[in-house]
Image (spheres, helix red, strand yellow):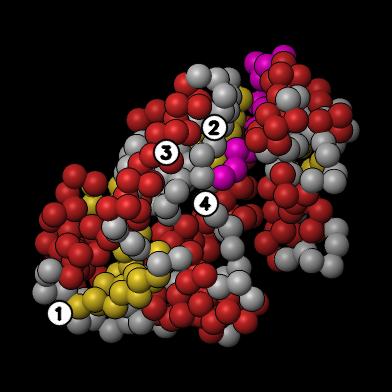
Amino acid sequence: MIKIFYPAQFFDANVRGSWMELLRSKDRSTRGSKTADDLALQNGISWIDKPEDADMLLVPMDWAYYYKQKSHGKVLQWANDWKNKIPVISQSNGDHGITVADGIWQFRSNIYASKNNHYQLATPPFFPDPVVTNFKQNEITVRPYEEVPVIGFCGQSISTPYKRIKDILRVSFLNVLHLIGANYWDTHKIMSTSHLREKVLRTIEKSSLQTNFIRRTKYRAGASTPEQREKTTLEYFKNQQDSDYIVCVRGGGNFSVRFYETLAMGRIPVFINTDCKLPLENNIEWEKHAVWVEEEEIQDIAEKIMAFHEKLGEDGFRALQQHNRKLWEANMTLSSFYLQALNEIVKQS
């Protein structure tokens, strides 16, 4: 059991959306919305009342909450007072993220590997099992091996000069605000991610690979009602189920939710590395689970996919689908990820 303390004076029960993920799980585990994942996580945690008796201390709200409330100074002072005695863990959500003082552990999705410090931990997104939720199955559907694989993608992809310029100006504006002290979000690489996605798709389409692309001009095809969201979600995961490899490119933040959904579906990501940091890198050999393409190698993406596919062969291709599904179950769900990550922090402290 990992003993965790959090300071009640820095906790706002009324803003649940900003709670640190571990507290949301703690809350769900005591109510009707609890899941087996929540229970598994909470079975490995003991919440205690005294910081000096804890294995780690938890900042209860996302950092953006404190910055918006202009209370981050007090929270940082508290964390800095403790961090050399007991590890302090925190969370920074969203596409941008906020970097705080060294020595304070941060769970976050958006990380640039070249800027990363030891205390920033890449966090996967957490979502219901798409195989169970969308297809009412407990096991993945294993695709048969074909000499020429099917490459799938379903999502927003638009590249017009107007959209590209708009994306670049938006990122540049946010970066300037940060540099002059008017914005607390971290700076981003100046680029148009929608253009990058379209560049990848068009490069694949020029090759002899089979494609299964569904392009959207709006996020989730502009779905606004529950019925529309259900329909587009099923289309999205059906696209993955009917493909062998899935194109995974970053979005507004420097990470891809699609990458983890692909693993959960038992498919093989074609991962475009834009200086990303992936979770549990010390324990997982990520390049064995995906076609790994550096951003500057996009022109060679078709050749890299075919080389990976041919090296796998029929047996390896079937096995990797199962291995990717097991990797997600064993490492990327809420309980499996946090229990590993928290224990690693305790060992290092």
Residue type at the position of mark 1? Glu
**Which is more foreground, mark 2 or mark 1?**
2
Q: Is residue 186 left or right of residue 71?
A: left
Residue on which the image places disc 2 = 185
Q: Secondary structure at mark 2?
A: loop
Q: Which of 260 and 343 lies nearest the eye of the viewer?
A: 260
Q: Evaluate whether residue 254 shows in this view.
A: yes
Residue on which the image places disc 1 = 147
Instruction: Compute the Cα span from label 1 to label 3.
Output: 41 Å
**Label 2 with label 4: CB-CB less than 8 Å:** no
Instruction: Compute the Cα span from label 2 to label 4.
Output: 20 Å
Residue at x 39%, y 78% (from the top left corner):
239
Residue on which the image places disc 4 = 124
**Label 1 with label 3: CB-CB less than 8 Å:** no
User: Residue 283 location, x and y as percent?
Assistant: 43, 45
Which of the two labelled residues, at mark 2 and mark 4, occupies the earlier sequence position?
4
**Label 2 with label 1: CB-CB less than 8 Å:** no
- State the mark number for residue 171: 3
Residue type at the position of mark 2? Trp
Residue at x 55%, y 20% (from the top left corner):
181
Which of the two labelled residues, at mark 3 and mark 4, occupies the earlier sequence position?
4
Instruction: Compute the Cα span from label 2 to label 3.
Output: 11 Å
Which of the two labelled residues, at mark 1 and mark 3, occupies the earlier sequence position?
1
**Which is more foreground, mark 2 or mark 3?**
3
**Which is more foreground, mark 2 or mark 4?**
2
Residue at x 62%, y 55% (from the top left corner):
334
Q: Is residue 170 left or right of residue 152?
A: right
Q: Secondary structure at mark 4?
A: loop
Crowding at mark 3 (Cα within 10 Å: few <14, some 14-19, many 20+): some
